[in-house]
Amino acid sequence: MHIESIYIGLPVYHKDSASCMTMTVRQVLPTGHVVCAWIEHDGREIEKAFWPNELEPGALKFGGSIIG
């Protein structure tokens, strides 16, 4: 599964992560990278850039497995 379109505010997950932590798309860079943000357990906000093919739509992942 891949993301057809990316927009600010889209909930996403990292494909290779065993975590079910939701990230939110913050920005799409001219390089094609997608900047995502999430809140760590200690309350810190983290931002990291990913390639679009590393991400999955957040609405389709539940309990660590893909629905579909």
Image (cartoon, grey):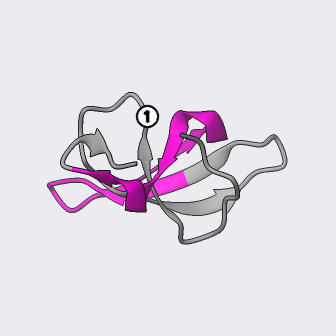
Q: Nearer the viewer, residue 42 or 66?
A: 66
- Left/right placement of residue 31 relative to residue 68 reads right
Q: Secondary structure at mark 1?
A: loop
- Residue corresponding to mark 1: 15
In the rendered image, residue 45, in percent from the top left (x then y), is placed at 35, 59
Q: Which residues are magenta?
A: 36-62
Q: Nearer the viewer, residue 1 or 58?
A: 1
Q: Nearer the viewer, residue 32 or 55?
A: 55
Quarter occupied by residue 41: bottom left
Report if residue 57 is visible in the image: yes
In the rendered image, residue 49, in percent from the top left (x then y), is placed at 58, 42
The extreme right residue here reads 30
Q: Residue at x 62, y 35 (%)?
A: 53
Q: Amino acid at mark 1?
A: Lys
Query: In the image, is residue 11 above or below residue 56?
Result: below
Report if residue 51 is visible in the image: no
